[in-house]
Image (tube, grey):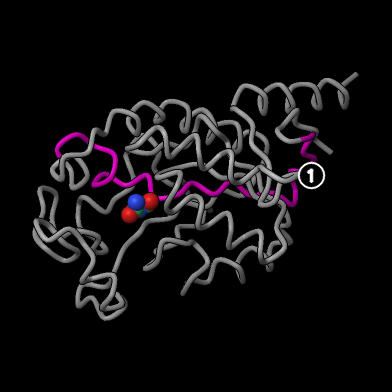
Amino acid sequence: MITVDAIPYPYQFDSRHTALVVIDMQRDFVEEGGFGSVLGNDVRPLTTIVPTVAKLLALARENGLLVVHTRESHLPDLSDCPPAKLKRGNPALGIGDEGPMGRILVRGEPGNQILPLLAPQDGELVIDKPGKGAFYATGLHTELQARGVTHLLFAGVTTEVCVQTSMREANDRGYECLIVEDACASYFPVFHQATLAMLTAQGGIVGWQAPLSTLQTAFKETSGETTS
Ligand code: C5J
């Protein structure tokens, strides 16, 4: 078992039953010149976490965790996009419109691809999700159950929208969840901080939080124990 010195109290997991879920690190949300930045968002809080997410991916791969990547995306005919979601998009540039990197939130478009530095490797799961949560209208729960996964580590963007929604969905399905606080970001740093507080309040009502360095220490201490 690995024990992480987390908030609100230590988080324990077995790597064989744990997956890292990286939410929506897609070009249109994160890259300067993509959908997010064209709408006037400052993407720097998102670009800043890319090296941390890359290190987290490396840590998960070295330690044999299942890795899951998600993309918020829709079919080209938008038949999987509820009218309410379509209507409430930004009128200047909405879902399915032609954006700076192809059609916004449409599968297969350049802007919908995961950043090359964080690209999925063979054997990793890639989940295309039409909602904010990774469990809604996807096969994720079935895939995780089939692999005996009970614990999930969350990273990605944005903290208060797709990461938080996915972690809440996971919590309701019985997974023990930890959010890697410096491997997530929001266009609005105050929302990032508020989300961490909401998720871990009341004795970890949705789960735990810890930074990457604490996870790295936990893995190191455990490998020291098994080799000595
Ligand atoms: C995500 C969004 N990925 N903010 N989407 O958080 O619409």
Q: Amino acid at mark 1?
A: Asp
Q: Is residue 80 above or below residue 228?
A: below
Q: Is residue 95 above or below residue 178?
A: below
Which of 33 and 128 lies nearest the eye of the viewer? 33
Q: Is residue 170 above or below residue 83?
A: above
Q: Quadrant of the C terminus?
A: top right
Classify mark 1: residues with Cα within 10 Å, few (<14), some (14-19) or many (20+): some
Kindly give the residue lying farthest to the right in the view shown.
228
User: How far from the left and from the top, in percent, is residue 142?
Assistant: 61, 71
Element assignment for label 1: loop
Q: Residue at the spot x=73%, y=28% of the render?
A: 219
Identify the image quadrant of residue 10: top right
Q: Residue at the spot x=20%, y=51% of the render?
A: 110
Which of 45 and 2 lies nearest the eye of the viewer? 45
Task: Return the residue at label 1.
Answer: 14
User: How far from the left and from the top, in percent, is residue 9?
Assistant: 78, 35
Q: Residue at the spot x=32%, y=30% of the render?
A: 47
**Label 1 CB sits under 8 Å from any ligand 1 atom:** no
Which of 101 and 226 lies nearest the eye of the viewer? 101
Q: Quadrant of the N terminus?
A: top right
Give the side of residue 8 with respect to residue 61, left or right: right
Identify the image quadrant of residue 178: top right
User: How far from the left and from the top, in percent, is residue 26?
Assistant: 32, 47
Q: Residue at the spot x=78%, y=43% of the render?
A: 13
| Numbered label tally | 1
- Read off the magenta span: 9-33
User: Would residue 196 be counted in the magenta stretch?
Assistant: no
